[in-house]
Amino acid sequence: MISEEIKNLGNIVFNDRDISPTQLGITSRKINYWLDHNLVPFVEKHQNVKNTETISKEAATKTKWIRLNLSQAVWVCIIDTLSSFGVSADKIYTLGKSIWHEPRVDKYADKVFKEHIKNNKHQLPKDVIQSLKQIVADEYWMKDFRKLINPFTDMLKSAILRESMPHTLLYVPGTNDFEFLYGDMNLTLKLSSVYTQHPMISIPMIPILAKVLAVDFGNKKKELSYLSEIEKQIRDIVVFKKPKIVEIAFENENIKPIVVTEQHKTREQLARYILEHKIAKGAKLLIEIRAQGNYKLTLIKN
């Protein structure tokens, strides 16, 4: 991964605050309650600007809209899932502190920067390494990075890059123990006795991430740098051409094909498909336009 790709991935996860809770099926009542109880990290209720005489009524209204970045949007969906299981706001608050605030206090981000500087596993150029050294030595900059970089956001980046499967949050409400599990199908080797002796909630990340990325898929203005060129073509056909039926198949039968119809949530279904089936580099896309607005998309490996 080159430095530009790392920067783009960071922007996707941390910087772009353009996801509305309503796009995720979260009501205003819910999000306001969660914000009042400090369940969503680093997100505040937006207030009207003080000097409304100098701006339009529309602009003043917009300042009240809550917008989330990708990591916050995924966390909001996790809160919604935990709430549906009857987990109390107090327990979710405690879990949120462990996931978001403790790594900040422990300076997890500093350790990540120093690891890049020491081992440089992505083979970053010397000027980038020098910039990392300057940033990690600057307390002003690191205060912001410590809010952004933690084990949870690292897992999300891994899921977006489709580096490994599965990606799961395991949580024990009775003890507040949790584990981010990814890249290993063997659960028993990962879990300590606390996970085998207490009720446990398992929250897979792919369905949640697919819901969040589906919002991105419908945004014509976004480049979606985490998609390959073929994946972008598929997204353009499914989302913007709005065909009645799209069959997506592989030349061989190693990956199960899907059929996307206008009756389904096409963006979410496509996002989940792409997250679960990383398309190999060098693959080619055969587009067959059929009658009555139907498409067949065949992915051909070299």
Image (spheres, rainbow, N blue to C red):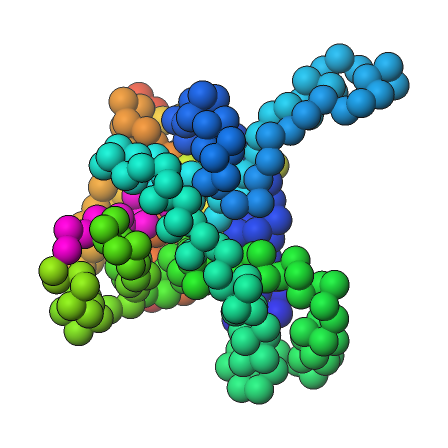
Q: Nearer the viewer, residue 198 or 121?
A: 198
What residue do we see at 28% from left, 27% from top?
264
In the rendered image, the vertical position of residue 195 relative to residue 16, given as above or below: below
What residue span does the magenta drawing correspond to?
Answer: 198-210
Residue placed furthest toward the bottom: 118
In the rendered image, the vertical position of residue 301 relative to residue 206, given as above or below: below
Q: Position of residue 235 (x, y in %)?
A: 43, 40
What residue do we see at 42% from left, 39% from top?
76
Answer left or right for 89 relative to 187. right
What residue do we see at 28% from left, 39% from top?
87
Q: Nearer the viewer, residue 129 or 112?
A: 112
Q: Nearer the viewer, residue 302 or 261?
A: 261
Q: Position of residue 221 (x, y in %)?
A: 61, 36
Answer left or right for 222 relative to 29. right
Is residue 188 shown to the viewer in this render? yes
Q: Position of residue 256 (x, y in %)?
A: 18, 50
What residue do we see at 23% from left, 51% from top?
174
On-image quarter of the C terminus: bottom left
* Residue 209 on the magenta span: yes
